[in-house]
Image: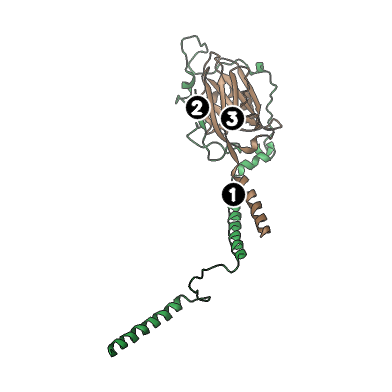
Amino acid sequence: MAKADAKLKRISGRRQQAISEARHFFPTTGPALTPGQSIQPENPKEFIMKHLRILLLATVATGGVFAAFASGAGPLARLSNSAAGVTGANAPLVLVDDDEDEDEGGYFHWKKSGHGHDRHDGEHHGDDDDDDDDDDDGQRQGGRNNPDQFGTTMPPKNGLILEGSAPKVQVN
Amino acid sequence: MKSLLAILSITTALTLPGLAMAREVTLTTNLKNYGGDGAYLAYYVTDANGAYVGSLWLAGGKARYYEHLSGWYRATGGDTGEISGITGASVGSGRSLSVTLDLADTLFDAGYELHIDAAVEDMRDSPSEVVVPLTVNGSGKAVQGSRYIADFNYKL
């Protein structure tokens, strides 16, 4: 009996010690709950305000990110400038005359080295196939280089086409 | 509380438009059966004053023939940098070309016009064969060409 009492005292002592240590790590800041009582915010308004503030901050941050993106996409803003600004500060304004007489365009023979201009000489040159040739006629004639085909490089940054976008082409 | 809600609505309204800066536009060109070789086509934009702004597409890969796209050539001096990455093959007689690009929203309803120059080997040049104002209402409306182009339309 005495042994049992001593054992009980040791257990209760250890329990008390454990409780006091737990309180050290998990201090209570409010009154203990009674059975059946649930936790409720002291002020519901404050609860809503707190969450609204968080939402507002998130929206402002998102707006800032988009604003930074918009400012980064600088070329698109060039459309609001004058044409002279777009083409270069010192570049002369080039007008495209819509009223030009078609006849002034001329009747031309496309120059092909080593070939006659007569299309009826039996040498028919394919239409699309010409553009796939790897010849360097452009180089021989004044060093004018052919432009990069689509798919090999990104479109120019001219403020018209979204930077980084790739064109899609279909020929029927 | 009410002021916070008001501020929240304003910031949201200012944020959303930033998402819509460009839109996908498809340019469709149908050529006539003109009975010649592949046509070179230059698509470029001018502003309300008629000044060149930039190029959208050039069908035809050989730079030495670009001088026959005389409207485009006069505006750019034949600078191939203007069409780097937006060049494809010429388009055959009777065929159609569809090009889809992400274009800036500010191009529409702001006085900008799209020009198409056309040229075919051993045939006449056709500068500005098609000229259409870029407007939202103009989407899907076909415009006829005068020489090589049967019709052209753009769709937003």
Task: Please tell me whether mark 3 or mark 2 is closer to you in this view.
Answer: 3
Q: Which residue is mark 3?
A: B155
Q: Which mark is residue A45?
A: none
Q: Which residue is mark 2?
A: A170
Against B57, residue A82 (above or below) is: below
**In the depicted view, which residue is nearer to us: A121 or A131?**
A131
Q: Are marks 1 and 3 on the same chain?
A: no
Q: Residue A61's spot in the image, x, y percent?
A: 59, 55
Against A2, residue B4 (above or below) is: above
Against A122, residue B19 (above or below) is: below
Q: Which residue is mark 1?
A: A66
The kind of residue on which mark 1 rests is Phe
Q: Quick one: which chain is brown?
A: B
Q: Residue B49's spot in the image, x, y percent?
A: 71, 32
Q: CA distance from mark 1 to mark 3?
A: 27 Å
Q: Label 1: few (<14), some or many (≥20) within 10 Å?
A: some
The kind of residue on which mark 3 rests is Lys
Q: Residue A129's spot in the image, x, y percent?
A: 46, 21
Which image quarter: residue A156? top right
- Identity of the residue drawn at 64% across and 35% down: B107
Circle 3/circle 2 CB separation < 8 Å: no
Toward the bottom, the furthest residue is A2
- Read off the chain for label 3: B
**In the depicted view, which residue is nearer to us: B156 or A101?**
B156
Q: Are marks 3 and 2 on the same chain?
A: no
Circle 2/circle 1 CB separation < 8 Å: no
Task: Describe residue A100's horizontal placement relative to residue A151 as left or right.
Answer: right
Toward the right, the furthest residue is B49
Q: Quick one: which chain is green?
A: A
Q: Label 2: few (<14), some or many (≥20) within 10 Å?
A: few
